[in-house]
Amino acid sequence: MELEASFLTIAWFIALGIFLPVVALTVGKWIRPNKPSSRKAITYESGVDPTGEGWVQFHVRYYLFALLFVIFDVETIFLYPWAVAYDSLRATLGVWVLYEMLIFIGLLVLGLAYAWKKKVLKWE
Amino acid sequence: MDVFFYLGPIILMLLLLGFVTYAILFERKVIGWIQNRPGPNQVGPWGLFQTIADVLKLLLKEDVVPGKADRSLFKLAPIIAFVPAFAILAVIPFTETWQFGDFAVGLLYYIAISSITIIGILTGAWASNNKYSLLGGMRSAAQMISYEIPLVLSVVGIVMTTGSLDLNDIVLAQKKVWFIVPQFLAFLIFLIASLAELNRTPFDLPEAESELVAGYHVEYTGFRFAFFMLAEYVYVFAMASLTTCLFLGGWLPLFGLTMIPGILWFLLKFSLVVFSLFWIRATMPRLRVDQLMQFAWKVLLPLSLLNIFLTAIFKEIPVLSSFY
């Protein structure tokens, strides 16, 4: 199949994916009851009246995990083309392909080890 | 071809809704049997209409949007969560000819698009303006991004062996032996990480009923809630299909039994994977949140990196190199 046709297929899949919830929710609107009241609109906290805002502060470690994620996700962007081309690179460049990737991953693993030692990975 | 182009995905969507309906029933049945009880058996013979009744009930429920919520984002979130779940199915090769979009980068597309759902979950969690849902959503995001790394890295070994990201090529490369054998370590990592990606027990912390009420979708009612659930089960479908293609040889027959059509082989392996997901759910207790995050970064990530180099080393060993 041509590349363009494949992209069209994906566009059609996305369109259908939007279509289903929109239609289902619109049809639902016609048949479901709608009796709003001020009590129903209260934020649900297991029956206790909520105090303060719902947008509370959360722990900084979420950001640290997000940073680690970005580092290793970018690494995979480099790993994938390398893996696809591995056989042909191995044939032309020799084992150096492997050593280079070892060095690259080694640097990132050093970062992981540092985070490990700094107890970033520990979740208390 | 044009008719199939437009009708195919619609048929797939209907099949998918059927799958989800009966996967939920099957899951409840399986868990029931494992816990020595019959499971749902009241609605229809053998409980066959149980899920349909549940869906109708959800459809007839009032749609409550909390007063403090960010209304537009609140309404948008289930759609953001559902669309990528359906869009990734475009690249799954069900049989040699039965594939919607034949992409050279199918695997990459799958991985890239499937992570968009995290944004939908976070949007819903934040827009609800509820402490529990925000905490649940943050936990969910932290868990999903942590386990995405080992999931993605474990597949690199397969890509090295195949030399392609095209799922068709990956399936065809398993003619000699399925990747579950030479890439067994990768399979284990992939299975564990995919369970965590699917937010299923033992990794269902974002939902942890006993501590977080219900996680990121506490405030959702009726059909909006149903779409979060639907997205989850569509991911079960997609992840089981991907596992089948990557490790179990897709539509390829076993023991050279070529008279059985490929689609049946695919369905057989696929059902096996789905069953194992339910089986694991019924058998394992839930992890603690501190164990969960450490396990991803301290165990699975180093192991998946190791797997890449093991694959490279095995490629050098003369006897083994034909498998890698």
Image: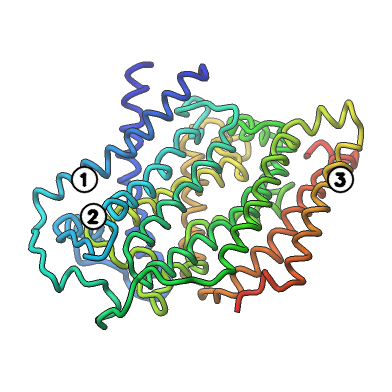
Q: Is residue A25 left or right of residue B154?
A: left
**Residue B14 vs residue B270: left or right?**
left
Q: Residue at the location (54% across, 62% down)?
A: B142
Dot 3, how many residues are within 10 Å of its Cα: few (below 14), some (14-19), or many (20+)?
A: some
The kind of secondary structure element at disc 1 is helix
In the current view of this chain or complex, which residue is farthest to the front? Answer: A52
**Residue matched to label 2:** B223
Amino acid at circle 3:
Ile
The residue lying toward the viewer, choosing from B235 and B81, is B81
Q: CA distance from mark 3 to mark 2?
A: 51 Å
- Residue nearer the viewer, A20 or A63: A63
Task: Write down the quadrant of residue B56 in the picture.
Answer: bottom left
Residue B162 image position (x, y, % from top left): 71, 34
Q: CA distance from mark 3 to mark 1?
A: 53 Å
Question: What residue appears at the point 40 percent right and 75 percent down from the top-left corner?
Answer: B212
Q: Is the same chain shared between marks 3 and 2? A: yes
- In the rendered image, which residue does mark 3 sit on? B313
User: Total number of numbered labels?
Assistant: 3
Kind of residue at badge 2: Phe
